[in-house]
Image: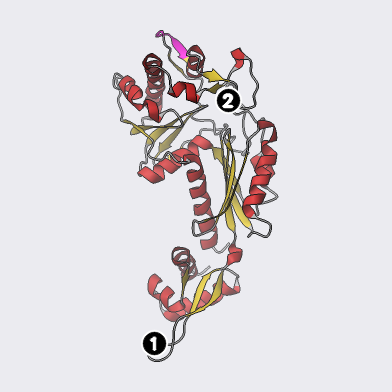
Amino acid sequence: METSDEHVLRTLMRHRRLTRAELATEIGISRPTAGESVRRLAARGLVADTGERTPGGRGRGRVGSYYALSPTIGVALAVTIAPEGVVAECVDVYGDVVGRAARPADPSKVATAISAAAQQARGEDGPPIRLAVVGAADPVDRATGRLVHLPDAPFLVGELDPVAILGRFVDGPIIVDNDVNWAALAERDRHGAGDFAYLYLGEGLGCAIVSDGEVRRGHTGLAGEIAHMLTVGPDGRAIRFIELFGELDLRRERSDGTGARGDKTAIDVDRLLTSDATTRAALGSAVGGVVAAVIALADPREVVIGGPWGPALVAEIRAATERMPRHVPVRAAALDDEPVLAGVRAEAIDRLRALVAAGE
């Protein structure tokens, strides 16, 4: 593809519609070059005449035609899978959400919920879906995109395969990653940070390491699974992080409604947020122990606390980390409104734009 063609496509992504003369000015090329590029792209079905015309005549020059990206270039699908529900959005190359659907996330019916949400978001006669990006509240095998069951995970959906489920809706690649990784990337984009550890503290526990602007996923994609790290318990002895919540009576049945009292896997966020000062201090110390381990292994510039209850305990976490030999700043996440979906959506838009700009 000619370099000028890519410039035309990217310029139309920013401005939505332009004449050939305006394209030449924006890009810094001659009008004949812009015209030839538009002709080639129109022949390939990537650019279309909108039917709109500039005013002409009476000293205002020739009538110009407005061109825009063809509606047939398609959209991208952004999907999140979490205990709160399945959300699917179709986003276009301009970054607009053109379709959205949500479904409950009963673990025994998640596959059906994903299919239904994707179909509704696209619509009956919607544009082709060029690619999909998925964020899941479970560990993800980076080689296959399948969800992986680990002990004490609060959202158990079995060996779910989002790639297979969405394959009938999507014409191109399907990218699946853990929800905490997507939240960390959204935080990176919002705050401009390139080296940090992102702790997600909610019904489940997770961590993402962002180094040089990239998430470090590990060999199989399971880096950051902090639930079973050893930390300090309420009485000062070593304890697995997830077991602390049982000691403090802050666990409840997992999201599939199963689990006897001794088999509760999800953290009770509501009860935790209304806990007393002693409990909050114990939680702060335990998170501080996890932070100490993360600092020792990953050496982040700062630690970001996200999730439904993490930011509410930043003061207690800071108090614990300030006593550590190696101290880094600890702050609450800058993005607290659907951070996972924000990360998934941004990746879907970026990948769609790259496909279109490449003329694919």
Q: Is residue 51 above or below residue 319?
A: below
Q: Is residue 31 magenta?
A: no
Quadrant position of residue 328: top left
326 vs 90, nearest the viewer: 90
Quadrant position of residue 105: top right
Q: Which residue is mark 2?
A: 153
Under tag 1, what secondary structure?
Answer: loop
Q: Is residue 165 visible?
A: yes
Determine crowd level at label 1: few under 14, some 14-19, many 20+ residues with C-alpha closer than 10 A.
few
Q: What secondary structure predominates along the stretch shown in magenta? A: loop
* x, y percent for residue 258: 65, 21
Residue 60 circle label: 1
**Three-letter code, disc 1:** Arg
Q: Is residue 8 above or below residue 200?
A: below
* x, y percent for residue 333: 39, 36
Mark with earlier residue (2, 1): 1
Q: Residue furthest front?
A: 274
In the rendered image, the quadrant that contains the C terminus is bottom right
- For the residues carrying marks 2 and 1, which lies nearer the camera in this image? 1
Under tag 2, what secondary structure?
Answer: loop
Left or right: where 265 falls relative to 53? right
* x, y percent for residue 222: 54, 30
Q: Is residue 180 above or below residue 297?
A: below
Determine crowd level at label 2: few under 14, some 14-19, many 20+ residues with C-alpha closer than 10 A.
many
275 vs 199, nearest the viewer: 275
20 vs 341, nearest the viewer: 341
Magenta stretch?
A: 235-239
* x, y percent for residue 22: 41, 75
Residue in the image at 51% along x and 74% along y: 67
**Three-letter code, disc 2:** Ala
Distance in Å between CA atoms under marks 2 and 1: 67 Å
